[in-house]
Image (cartoon, helix red, strand yellow):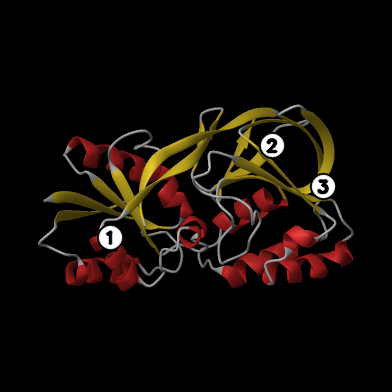
Amino acid sequence: MEKITFIINPTAGHKRYRTVEKEIYKYINRNKFQFNIEYSKQRGDVKNLAKKAIISGSNIIIAVGGDGTVNEVSSEIINSKVKMGVIPVGSGNGLALCLGIPTNIKKAIEKINLNNFKKIDCISGNNLHSINLIGFGFDAFVAKEFSKEKNRGLVKYIYLTFKFLLNYKPKYFTIRFENELKKIKVFSLNICNGKQFGNNFLISPKSEIDDGNLRISIIKAFKWYQFIYLLLLFIFKKIHKSKFFKSYKTKKVFIESESKNLIHVDGESQIIKKSIEIYIKPKSINFIV
């Protein structure tokens, strides 16, 4: 019998965590699994609870939250035999949607009961870990403002996007990968393992979560009145058709700017140095799908 630890992040997404514990008890297969449930209470708790679960003998850890919660759990099981999964109750749930994991709690638990898993890649660099994507530019700025909000969700994200769009100033980045060197003024720059930000907003349609490659997805600077056009392309999953969009495949990339960078790592904002080297760790996470 395998042992599962469910780690619930009460601050994630739409507060659906209130019903998760009840549904875990109702739908988890007790003939296959022994389980316990832990709640994070403050920043850093998820990682610590994941470490504790591994020490106590759990060979499956389930993140109950969004991409940030998945990030913290996955950072503790890289290249180990421990499996992880997700019950996606976050604001965007980008990785879960990439992997075809339902946002319906009961159906997500049924996936866990099947216990099928695949090895997926993750992103690393400058002591950072990402399971989905690392973003620079406007996306990182909105992620920072979004993190301050008590009530989150797609509507709030779109509201903040329009609120700050006119005052945002794109910046230049120098990007080195393979045998190429590019200096580009960008609105948005994302280093992608997965395909999307969340809520089915694709930023890297050609990404595959287990192909051993990164995708550099760039939206170049544009005029403010062209944003509606780009937003419509996002809605219809056609952003890669835009003349402002560029994408490159690589295993490693070096990014440099003239000042410190505000970035987001799987939706969580932070400040880093002027330069960063990012690379892929192939098939390093056992993820229940």
Which amino acid is tagged 1? Answer: Ile
Q: Residue 170 has which mark?
A: 3
Quick check: can you spot residue 118? yes
Q: Nearer the viewer, residue 156 or 61?
A: 61
Instruction: Identify the residue shown where x is 55% and y is 51%.
Output: 194
Residue 218 % position (x, y): 75, 48
Instruction: Identify the residue shown where x is 41% and y is 59%.
Output: 11
Tag 3 secondary structure: loop
Residue 251 % position (x, y): 61, 33
Q: Look at the image and tell me in which quarter the C terminus lies.
A: bottom left
Taking 210 as reference, is 242 left or right? Answer: right
Quick check: can you spot residue 42? no
Which amino acid is tagged 3? Answer: Pro
Q: Residues within 10 Å of mark 2 (few under 14, many from 20)?
A: some
Per the image, the residue denoted by label 2 is 261
Residue 146 % position (x, y): 59, 58
Taking 123 as reference, is 218 left or right? Answer: right
Per the image, the residue denoted by label 1 is 112
**In the displayed structure, would residue 209 be above or below residue 90?**
above
Q: Looking at the image, is mark 1 or mark 3 earlier in the sequence? A: 1
Q: Looking at the image, is mark 2 or mark 3 earlier in the sequence? A: 3
Q: Nearer the viewer, residue 32 or 145?
A: 32
Which amino acid is tagged 2? Answer: Asn
Taking 236 as reference, is 80 left or right? Answer: left
**In the displayed structure, would residue 69 be above or below residue 227?**
above
Instruction: Identify the residue shown where x is 15% and y is 49%.
Output: 2
Q: Nearer the viewer, residue 281 or 129?
A: 281
Q: Nearer the viewer, residue 59 or 156?
A: 59
